[in-house]
Image: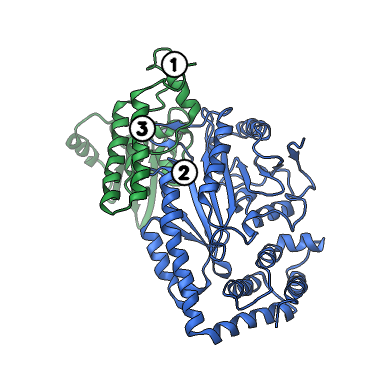
């Protein structure tokens, strides 16, 4: 939601009820300070509440929301995403990573890590980068590798326990593939 | 040598409305229950905004770069390309009925409600088989689809994997080590792969066991949808079963689970329900199938819904060997030809809804009489 006075995001919402009629004000922090609705953040909560309590007409409610994080690349705010369900660009995934994580886990049966195909071009780009390390971090760091391997091992154990041998074989293949990738970066792209 | 075909303003998706449409061939493994196996991959170009944040100029640029790569990568012997913002309403309807584009893509509208008919977007398809189709600028920059008749996910996946590899040689896809292939909607992130089987489950519906199967499917994070996918009703007991999660499970594991564990079970359930009906309620089943044939070969007015329902009964009659001599492929073809867009295409003019009901009944009558005369009786 935009500020009533400018194009910034509204983070201060004042609702005043006068004679049964509700008046709403939605302001950004700056405009709110200018209107004297709220005193800039930074003070302690008690201090803030104390100042707010002075001189407010009865029947007034003030809600302070925090500015929704914004993707630096495409400008999409997280609250806009909550509303539309669609992200704006690839960078949104890193910009909102902390918030998307739990959301994705709920949508994908608790999974938080990609398992499966990796684009070969991206893979080659990583391997061919001069230092071997500084290229685009497509394959993920050692920790992410370890996470993927751990997840696969867990699924493998489950499959074996459930006597799903075919599935177990497939998981074992995947695990082996993952481990080869880790051990021999550049092995396939010697040319 | 054959090359890409451009068709805009006039040309039809297939050389004739009777041809193509792999999913209606009525052949393939377990075709008595599984009409088709379809794999779809969602891909986005790296360094470009996703559709919801892309300006008109950016959408046009994305469309252009995808167009040249799709048409020049030798994905199929012949590829058709149709720019949908320039296509007629009739053309878009035909494409939806052939399952080559989604309703959303036909309208050019994203799921957040933005967009419209004039948004630059297209579909590419291999012709005349229509086994491969690629929607450009739908919710994601690319939605690649490969379809095979019967239960054939392994084959379909291999084919789409090769297409993906070929495209990837010239296009950088948005990808992250943690989240996999990045998509506009986070419910598709990861593999970006949606596997879906089109199933014919009339016996499970009749015995009331379908609800049980639906619940079991939901417990395994599988979605059960109608004939036209998202939000559509099950027409004539045809259902689409597809995976709902795309993160944390590789394409191969997903494919093998569906093809070797889940679908064989559903197929077994449907077949045993059919056997049960034949054993316990043979008379009633035969009556129902013959009534369906009777209506289809004699009615003078018919809606799409009624025709789908009756053709479903006839299909059941054929696979249960109650009806001999009626061709499964002929029934499948009719399922396509009775749809409003195709019906008008066959008749060669646009019709009102009332005229369509008459034309539909006439078409079905003549087609079924010629295809079943030899064996009926
Ligand atoms: Zn303001
Ligand atoms: Zn973004």
Q: Which chain does the residue under circle 1 lie in? A: A
Q: Which residue is mark 2?
A: B185
Q: Position of residue B63 (x, y in %)?
A: 64, 35
> Cα distance, mark 1 to mark 3?
20 Å
Instruction: Please tell me whether mark 2 or mark 1 is closer to you in this view.
Output: 1
Q: Tell me the crowding category of disc 1: few under 14, some 14 to 19, or many 20 or more residues within 10 angstroms, Cα based.
A: few
Does A25 appear above or below B304?
A: above
Q: Can the viewer see residue B112 in this picture?
A: no
Q: Are marks 3 and 2 on the same chain?
A: no
Q: Which residue is mark 3?
A: A178
Determine the CA span between mark 2 and mark 1.
Answer: 31 Å
Q: Which chain is green?
A: A
Residue designated by label 1: A129
Chain letter of the blue region: B
Q: Residue furthest top?
A: A130
* Mark 2 surroundings within 10 Å by alpha-carbon count, few (fewer than 14), some (14 through 19), many (20 or more): some
**Residue appearing at x 70%, y 83% in the figure:** B377
């Amino acid at each position: 939601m935009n500020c009533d006075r400018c194009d910034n995001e509204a983070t201060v919402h004042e609702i005043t009820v006068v004679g049964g009629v509700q008046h709403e004000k939605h302001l950004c922090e700056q405009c709110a300070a200018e209107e004297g609705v709220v005193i800039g953040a930074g003070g302690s909560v008690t201090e803030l509440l104390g100042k707010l309590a002075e001189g407010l007409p009865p029947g007034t409610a003030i809600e302070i929301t925090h500015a929704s994080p914004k993707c630096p690349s495409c400008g999409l705010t997280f609250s806009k995403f909550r509303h539309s369900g669609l992200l704006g660009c690839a960078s949104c995934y890193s910009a909102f990573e902390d918030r998307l994580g739990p959301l994705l886990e709920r949508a994908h049966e608790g999974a938080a890590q990609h398992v499966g195909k990796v684009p070969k071009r991206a893979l080659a780009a990583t391997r061919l980068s001069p230092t071997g390390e500084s290229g685009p971090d497509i394959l993920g760091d050692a920790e992410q590798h370890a996470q993927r391997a751990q997840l696969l091992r867990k699924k493998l154990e489950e499959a074996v326990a459930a006597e799903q041998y075919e599935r177990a074989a497939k998981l074992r293949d995947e695990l082996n593939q993952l481990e080869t990738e880790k051990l021999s970066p550049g092995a396939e792209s010697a040319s | 040598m054959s090359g890409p075909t451009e068709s805009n303003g006039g040309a039809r998706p297939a050389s004739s409305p009777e041809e193509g449409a792999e999913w209606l061939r009525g052949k393939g493994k377990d075709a008595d229950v599984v009409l088709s196996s379809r794999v779809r991959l969602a891909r986005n170009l790296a360094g470009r905004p996703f559709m919801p944040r892309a300006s008109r100029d950016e959408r046009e640029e994305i469309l252009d770069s995808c167009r040249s790569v799709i048409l020049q990568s030798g994905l199929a012997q012949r590829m058709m390309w149709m720019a949908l913002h320039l296509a007629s309403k009739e053309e878009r309807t035909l494409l939806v009925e052939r399952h080559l584009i989604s309703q959303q893509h036909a309208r050019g509208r994203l799921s957040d409600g933005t967009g419209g008919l004039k948004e630059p977007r297209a579909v590419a398809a291999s012709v005349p088989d229509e086994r491969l189709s690629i929607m450009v600028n739908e919710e994601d920059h690319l939605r690649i689809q490969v379809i095979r008749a019967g239960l054939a996910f392994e084959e379909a996946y291999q084919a789409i994997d090769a297409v993906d590899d070929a495209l990837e040689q010239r296009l950088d896809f948005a990808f992250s080590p943690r989240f996999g292939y990045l998509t506009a909607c986070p419910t598709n992130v990861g593999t970006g792969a949606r596997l879906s089987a089109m199933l014919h489950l009339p016996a499970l519906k009749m015995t009331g066991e379908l609800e049980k199967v639906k619940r079991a499917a939901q417990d395994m994070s599988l979605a059960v949808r109608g004939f036209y996918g998202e939000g559509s009703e099950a027409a004539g007991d045809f259902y689409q079963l597809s995976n709902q999660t795309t993160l944390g499970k590789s394409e191969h594991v997903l494919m093998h689970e569906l093809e070797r564990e889940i679908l064989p079970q559903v197929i077994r359930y449907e077949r045993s329900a059919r056997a049960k009906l034949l054993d316990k309620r043979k008379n009633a089943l035969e009556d129902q199938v013959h009534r369906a044939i009777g209506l289809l070969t004699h009615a003078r007015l018919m809606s799409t819904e009624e025709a789908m329902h009756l053709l479903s009964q006839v299909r059941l009659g054929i696979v249960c060997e109650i009806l001999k001599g009626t061709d499964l492929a002929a029934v499948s073809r009719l399922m396509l030809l009775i749809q409003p867009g195709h019906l008008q295409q066959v008749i060669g003019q646009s019709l009102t809804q009332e005229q369509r009901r008459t034309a539909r009944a006439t078409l079905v009558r003549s087609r079924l009489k010629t295809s079943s005369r030899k064996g009926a009786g």
